[in-house]
Amino acid sequence: QVQFVESGGGSVQPGGSLRLSCAPSTNIFSFFIMGWYRQAPGKERELVATLTSGGSTNYADFVKGRFTISRDNAKNSVYLQMNSLKPEDTAVYYCTGSRLVFPRGDFWGQGTQVTVSS
């Protein structure tokens, strides 16, 4: 079973920054795409950013210019750098990855809480 170890969540004031980390239990290049989603209380889970194995990125409009998704091949990790955080960014953030090789499918981390409040 593929697992993710997420870290980096916490509480920050508006305008602050956090960096989320996600380390899968398998090689990150075994995922054709990895990304971050978030879910705020009472809301549906929504896409934040994705990164393909080829290096292409995609961002939700509400984080463009503020968040950056990246990876460190040597550390086998994917990151989400979050700057200029707003209270509406408060949510549980989930790392996810999709594989076409065994075991195939979509895999999710357990989530890490991000709270933006003054």
Image: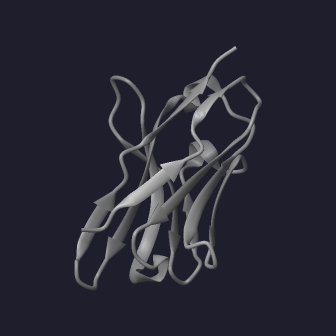
Instruction: Decide: is 58 above or below 43.
Output: below
Whether 88 is drawn above or below 38: the answer is above
Occupied quadrant, residue 115:
top right
**112, 99: nearer the viewer:** 112
Residue found 72% across the figure and 50% down from its top? 65
| Scheme by which the image is coloured | one colour
**How many labels sit on residues?**
0
User: Whole-percent x and y of residue 103?
Assistant: 22, 78
Task: Where is residue 99? Give x, y as percent.
Answer: 32, 77
Left or right of 30 on screen, residue 84: right
Residue 1, given in percent of the width and then of the height, sits at 24, 68
**With 10 as the anchor, is 5 left or right in this view?**
left
Above or below, 88 against 112 in this view is above
* Residue at the top extreme, as displayed: 118
Residue positioned 59% across, 78% down in the render: 55
Residue at point 54%, 51% (across, down): 60
Q: Which residue is drawn at 40% across and 59% down?
A: 4
In which quadrant of the rendered image does the C terminus lie?
Answer: top right
Q: Tell me where residue 114 appears, x and y as whole percent.
A: 55, 33
Quadrant housing residue 17: top right
Q: Please tell me which residue lies in front, 42 or 76.
A: 76
Q: Nearer the viewer, residue 77 or 99?
A: 77
